[in-house]
């Protein structure tokens, strides 16, 4: 990117006009830098059913069950391309005097990620159009789509694309600052000059560039549930380890001892065992793989099944707020309570990190002296005793029977909790 003659050249960059999680194009601006396409995406828009009152299709007036039966084909350069199909309620062609009535009202959108489609298979189905309104999630109708992802090259070319950077090289060699990325979203002005023109509200809504809503407690809970669901395997692994060391299944615990001895005497089997286990999990879940894409918004994952009216009103409120002062004060107090819990969590994380630093900072001379002496003893023991024996003894000690275990916290935990931190110095 350089300035020449008063013009800005971004040939090596991709001019972003869509959110990164739903982008349909990652190519650079210069056509000569484009890679050959991997295939084509064929999208057939059959029609809609049950609409309540734009793949850039033609407008159909006065119909709640419009039918288009149109087919579109685009070259695909990235297997993770996302297609977005939006439905709008357009104003009459002759125009309206009322400005609000002359705007195109969105009725929902469907997003399909091509990487979730099998090669050459036609997916045809009826997908719901769901809008999040101030009164809650509302089903505006259904759109019938048929889509197929056909690759023109070999399967190796498609697999190789997964390892290549999605954005052009200039984005990594000379990155665009995050504060300047939104300034590159020029699609609304460009599409407004097309023939026939595409309304600005349509372009901004399709590109998720419309006026953003404020803080949403519903989205906060939804994102928290997403994180918990994505990390559920960590909780399952911790629960399995706790059940094993508690001897709830003596056979499983005995097998864990045997596996521990085997891996300790043959450490070269650790990595192959872990990778084979992950592969076995993937093969086991192949039977329950999704048979069709899920492009429509998930009401349950969005926490919109039974939303709180007050939270929805807060989510759709303008900035600055247009609500009465007592309502704003109540929301402010609720936000303060949420912030207080977040403040406590951040303080706890900072305390644990400062205690780790206190192990060698000599803020507590006796604790640091004990830790340094213990490190020297551990180093000498590991030097003289084979590491295999140390691993087996440590594993057997950790898996010892509950009758040989004290219910009180371990001395290491007690020692760590007594280390100093900056908590007592924070006002």
Image (cartoon, rainbow, N blue to C red):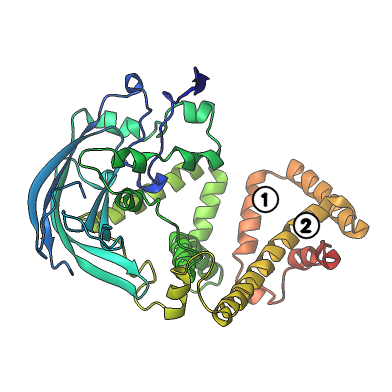
Instruction: Name the residue: 34% across, 32% down.
Output: 161
In the image, 398: left or right of 260? right
- At mark 1, the secondary structure is helix
- Kindly tell me whether residue 289 is visible in this rendering: no
- Please tell me how crowded label 1 is: few (under 14), some (14-19), or many (20+) other residues with Cα within 10 Å: some
Q: Give residue 37's quadrant in the image.
A: top left
- Residue 99 picture location, percent across and down: 30, 60
Q: CA gap, disc 1 to disc 2?
A: 30 Å
Residue 331 sits above or below residue 17 on the image: below
- Residue 361 picture location, percent across and down: 86, 51
Residue under pointer 1: 390
Closer to the camera in the image, 123 or 207: 207
In the image, 47: left or right of 127? left
List the single residue furthest toward the front.
Answer: 97
Q: Give residue 159's quadrant in the image.
A: top left
Numbered circles on residues, count: 2
List the single residue furthest toward the right.
Answer: 365
Q: Earlier in the sequence, mark 1 or mark 2?
A: 2
Q: Are marks 1 and 2 in contact (CB under 8 Å)?
A: no
Closer to the camera in the image, 375 or 112: 112
Instruction: Name the residue: 44% across, 75% down.
Output: 313
In the image, 364: left or right of 88? right
Instruction: Name the residue: 24% across, 30% down.
Output: 38
- At mark 2, the secondary structure is helix
Q: Give residue 52's quadrant in the image.
A: bottom left
Closer to the camera in the image, 366 or 220: 220
Residue 115 sits above or below residue 315 on the image: above
- Kindly tell me whether residue 53 is visible in this rendering: yes
Residue under pointer 2: 354
- Residue 87 picture location, percent across and down: 22, 56
């Amino acid at each position: 990117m350089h300035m020449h003659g008063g013009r800005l050249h971004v040939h090596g960059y991709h001019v972003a006009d869509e959110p990164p999680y739903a982008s349909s194009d990652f190519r650079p601006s210069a056509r000569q830098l484009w890679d050959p396409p991997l295939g084509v995406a064929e999208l057939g828009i059959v029609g809609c059913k049950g609409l309540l009152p734009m793949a850039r299709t033609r407008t159909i007036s006065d119909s709640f069950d419009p039918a288009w039966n149109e087919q579109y084909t685009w070259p695909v350069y990235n297997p993770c391309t996302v297609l977005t199909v939006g439905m709008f309620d357009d104003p009459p062609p002759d125009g309206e005097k009322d400005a609000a009535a002359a705007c195109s009202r969105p009725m929902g959108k469907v997003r399909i990620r091509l990487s979730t489609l099998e090669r050459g298979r036609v997916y045809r189905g009826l997908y719901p159009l769901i809008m999040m309104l101030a009164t809650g999630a509302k089903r505006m109708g259904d759109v019938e789509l048929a889509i197929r992802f056909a690759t023109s090259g070999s399967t190796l070319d498609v697999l190789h694309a997964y390892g290549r950077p999605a954005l052009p090289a200039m984005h990594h060699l000379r990155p665009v600052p995050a504060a300047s990325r939104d300034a590159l979203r020029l699609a609304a002005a460009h599409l407004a000059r097309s023939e026939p023109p595409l309304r600005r509200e349509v372009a901004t809504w399709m590109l998720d560039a419309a006026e953003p809503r404020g803080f949403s407690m519903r989205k906060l809970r939804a994102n928290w549930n997403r994180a918990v669901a994505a990390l559920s395997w960590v909780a399952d692994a911790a629960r399995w380890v706790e059940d094993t060391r508690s001897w709830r299944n003596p056979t499983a615990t005995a097998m864990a001892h045997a596996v521990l001895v085997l891996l300790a005497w043959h450490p070269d089997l650790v990595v192959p065992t872990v990778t084979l286990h992950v592969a076995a999990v993937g093969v086991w879940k192949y039977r329950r793989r999704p048979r069709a894409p899920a492009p429509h918004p998930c009401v349950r994952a969005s926490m919109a099944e039974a939303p709180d009216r007050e939270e929805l009103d807060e989510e759709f409120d303008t900035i600055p707020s247009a609500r009465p002062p007592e309502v704003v004060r109540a929301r402010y107090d609720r936000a303060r309570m949420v912030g207080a819990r977040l403040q406590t969590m951040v303080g706890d994380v900072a305390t644990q990190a400062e205690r780790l630093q206190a192990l060698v900072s000599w803020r507590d001379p006796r604790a640091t002296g004990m830790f340094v002496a213990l490190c020297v003893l551990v180093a000498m023991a590991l030097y003289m005793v084979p590491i295999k024996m140390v691993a087996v003894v440590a594993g057997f000690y950790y898996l010892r029977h509950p009758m040989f275990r004290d219910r009180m916290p371990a001395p290491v935990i007690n020692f760590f909790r007594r280390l100093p931190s900056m908590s007592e110095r924070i006002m």
